[in-house]
Image (spheres, helix red, strand yellow):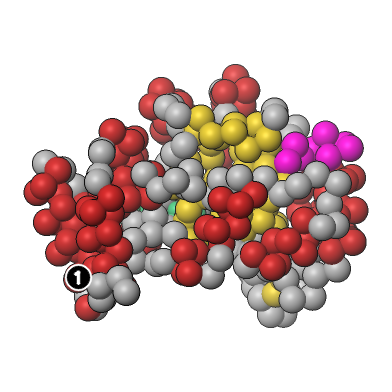
């Protein structure tokens, strides 16, 4: 599996496993160990979490697995996020869902994530969403402290616009290493709003969430989805690839921005499909057929 370098001492696997839905998979710690080991065998070594996933439960489920097999830790990179406060029975003081990027909250959240994940360090901490009330000096202080304490190795953001990314970056001692955004053949915003341009300019590989549009590509109605589904069939026939999910991964993987798709399934067959997609040689015209189906018109 190709490795993607994010910093002099940090590389991710090109395909990442996302654990947002882990609580829905009803796995016990042994099963989570087995799934993680199989991912590592396939070359997937980077795992994406957030404090809030599964109503604040997914990190702990993964942590139980790491406790069972501590040697896994040195083979993997853990990404987690902070900055969203959900309404939850676990936090009755959250009257409304809101964002908090204060120094106090970031440090508290990381300490909790370390405890949940049963690890001493997080490879990359992301600020989950841009916070309209962010004080970047405070956020930067939190990052510096966590780095000094050895609790977090590197920092990034998620769902930030290029200007939000630049703004926070300008306050930091070390540059942000990634922006995790929604990218798929049915969700092209990152190509239009400057996010991909910025990643290319700064040589920062983006992480792509919902690379299969959260599964909607298989189930949803709607003109755009139908058009993309239809063209995937057509391109699939040309390439001899029968699984539309593989074509959606390949569409991201062949892009020059070194997009790292985050696979959201817990089913091994589907995870293997993502890895196999790295072998697909899609032509520029096939890439554009899918683009054209998504935008619903020829390019200008
Ligand atoms: N930063 C953010 O704001 C943010 C937001 C959302 C997600 N994320 C991250 O991105 C990761 C991936 O997101 P995602 O889960 O939305 O990714 P996704 O891969 O676009 O969607 C996964 C969904 O698609 C379904 N699926 C996959 N293959 C299928 C197939 N062949 N047929 C039918 N259904 C299929 C899966 O069902 P099965 O489980 O049954 O396979 C699952 O429900 C998350 O785990 C999380 O780590 C980040």
Above/below status of 267 relative to 84: above
Classify the position of the N terminus by image quarter: top left
For ligand 1, give the image quadrant.
bottom left
- Quarter of the image for residue 246 reads top left
Q: Nearer the viewer, residue 142 or 89?
A: 142
Q: Please indicate whether residue 73 sits to the left or right of residue 15 in the image.
A: right
Q: In which image quadrant can residue 254 be found?
A: top left
Q: Position of residue 73 (x, y in %)?
A: 61, 26
Taking the spot 80% from the left edge, 70% from the top edge, the residue there is: 134
Residue 8, placed above or below residue 61: above
- In the shown orientation, is residue 151 left or right of residue 126? right
Within 10 Å of disc 1 (Cα), the crowding (few <14, some 14-19, many 20+) is some
Q: Quadrant of residue 94?
A: bottom right
Q: Position of residue 132 (x, y in %)?
A: 74, 76
Q: Which residues are magenta?
A: 147-154
Quarter of the C terminus within the rendering: bottom left
Residue position for label 1? 227
Between 158 and 94, the one lying in front of the other is 158
Q: Is residue 223 magenta?
A: no
| Residue at 86% from the left image edge and 68% from the top image edge | 135
Give percent across and percent down for residue 217. 27, 63
- Residue 49 visible in the current orientation: no
The residue at 79%/75% (across/down) is 133
> For numbered disc 1, what is the local secondary structure?
helix
């Amino acid at each position: 599996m190709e490795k993607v370098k994010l910093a002099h001492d940090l590389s991710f696997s090109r395909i990442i496993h996302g654990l947002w839905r882990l609580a829905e998979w009803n796995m016990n710690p042994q099963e989570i160990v087995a799934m993680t080991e199989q991912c590592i065998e396939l070359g997937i070594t980077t795992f994406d979490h957030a404090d809030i996933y599964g109503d604040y439960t997914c990190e702990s489920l993964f942590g139980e697995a790491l406790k069972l097999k501590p040697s896994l830790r040195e083979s993997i990179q853990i990404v987690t996020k902070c900055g969203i406060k959900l309404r939850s029975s676990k936090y009755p003081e959250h009257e409304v869902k809101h964002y908090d990027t204060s120094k106090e909250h970031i440090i508290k959240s990381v300490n909790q994530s370390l405890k949940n994940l049963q690890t001493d360090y997080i490879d990359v901490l992301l600020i989950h969403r841009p916070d309209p009330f962010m004080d970047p000096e405070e956020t930067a202080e939190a990052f510096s402290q966590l780095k000094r304490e050895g609790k977090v190795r590197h920092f990034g953001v998620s769902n930030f616009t290029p200007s939000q990314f630049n703004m926070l970056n300008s306050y930091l001692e070390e540059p942000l290493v990634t922006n995790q955004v929604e990218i798929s053949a049915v969700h092209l915003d990152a190509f239009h709003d400057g996010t991909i341009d910025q990643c290319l300019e700064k040589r920062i590989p983006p992480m792509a969430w919902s690379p299969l549009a959260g599964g909607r590509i298989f189930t949803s109605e709607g003109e755009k989805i139908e058009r993309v589904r239809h063209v995937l069939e057509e391109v699939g026939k040309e390439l001899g690839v029968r699984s539309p999910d593989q074509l959606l991964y390949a569409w991201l993987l062949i892009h020059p921005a070194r997009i790292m798709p985050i696979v959201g399934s817990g089913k091994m067959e589907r995870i293997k499909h993502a890895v196999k997609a790295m072998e697909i040689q899609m032509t520029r015209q096939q890439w554009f057929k899918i683009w054209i189906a998504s935008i619903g018109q020829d390019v200008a």
